[in-house]
Amino acid sequence: MEEKLRTIKEEAHTEITQSQSETTLREIEIKYLGRNGILTSILRNVKDLKPEDKPIVGKLGNEIKIYIANLIEEQSKKLQNKKFAEQEKEWIDISAYTLEPKITGHLNPLTSLQYELEDIFKNMGFHVWEGPYLEKEEYNFTALNIPQDHPARDMQDTFWIDKNHVLRTHTSPVQIRAMQSLKPPFRVIVPGRVFRYEATDASHENTFYQLEGLMIDKNISISHLIYTMKTFLSAILHKDIEIRLRPGYFPFVEPGLELEISCIFCDKKGCSICKHGGFIELMGCGLVHPDVLKYVNIDPEVFSGFAFGMGLERLVMLKHRINDIRYFLGGDLRFVTQF
Ligand code: FA5
């Protein structure tokens, strides 16, 4: 019996040390140590052995039982460590890029145009200025020669915040801010968002962008205005542009003018875009009104200036042949990803 037990020990040793999975180990455990396992059965039957064999087989049987149990546990640990070591080899670095990142963001066509305009004007000696969206009523109207109760206030439908504040209806109030802060001569442009309490249609938004320009110096005349407009419009539209001026009413300039450009689509021959007139209306402009200069303590006898204000959407629409201004704020990716 002693010999049989030693053979069982050797066989169990071989099986355990050669096993490669937890499942096999559990099967071996059941085979030797389970309720009806080989070793369990031998120990259960010790009582039937000869009295002199009982202590030897009992002792040796129990030693082998502990030996097998320990060996199974040891092998189990070895298998687990091996498994972890293998996993470590194929460790995934989640911080590493496996694919090229997809870049979908880019500048909105309005922003690109604004940056292009800023570059053109900077080359002509203009500084870029900004002003607040929530503007004092005084700067949006009164200082621009549009006093309270003047009918000109109705020309721009206004979001009133309270009696003294509005969402600016144009970038012209920044003219006042610039003239109060800078000493003439100077040149500034002011790109920015403006707001009007207006019903929208293909060419009108309630939130849109304007670009304001202001030049104050000695002896400024309409010729300076025309030259500057022609230069920047030809640069931005990559074409020689012809300009036409018609009288326009803006209380803060005198004379006030509406500027039209020769149609870039038909070269003045007439088409649906210029409504067969050969020219397209683009912006308001004029020479700064003496009353506005006086309001900011600039002597109109010494200094004069020109100012202009145009809608940026309208210019982008011309450049890219966009037929509805509402696309800009529509949030349709098919629209923005074209540019
Ligand atoms: C003004 O806002 C004047 N501040 C412009 C100005 C500045 C005149 C300096 C003289 C000197 P007007 O309301 O016409 O003027 O607007 C100027 C431009 O903004 C228009 O020519 C047009 O291009 C654009 N615009 C006006 N209303 C809208 C609108 N609802 N949606 C989109 N663009 C608009």
Image: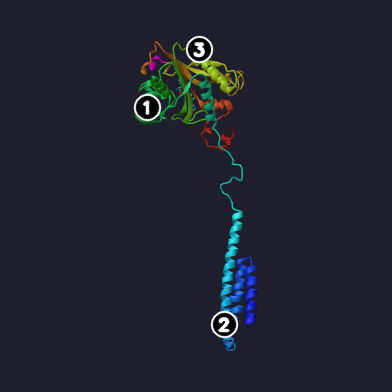
- First in sequence, mark 1 or 3: give its number: 1
Q: Which residue is mark 2?
A: 58
Mark 1 and mark 3: Cα distance apart in space: 33 Å
Q: Nearer the viewer, residue 67 or 38?
A: 67
* Residue 143 visible to the viewer: yes
- Asked which secondary structure carries label 2, the reply is helix
Residue extent of the magenta highlight = 288-293
* Residue 146 visible to the viewer: no
Which residue shows up at 58% across the image and 22% down it?
237
- Asked which secondary structure carries label 1, the reply is strand
Which of the numbered marks, if any, corresponds to residue 136? 1
Q: Which residue is mark 3?
A: 223
Amino acid at pointer 3: Ser
Residue 284 vertical placement versus 79 (above, below): above
User: Which residue is situated farthest in the bottom direction here?
Assistant: 51
Q: Which color mode does the image show?
A: rainbow
- Asked which secondary structure carries label 3, the reply is helix
Magenta span has 290?
A: yes
Q: Nearer the viewer, residue 262 or 57?
A: 57
Give the quarter of the figure containing the C terminus: top right
Residue 276 vertical placement versus 15 (above, below): above
Please state which of the two labelled residues, at mark 2 or mark 3, is closer to the viewer: 2
The secondary structure making up most of the magenta span is helix
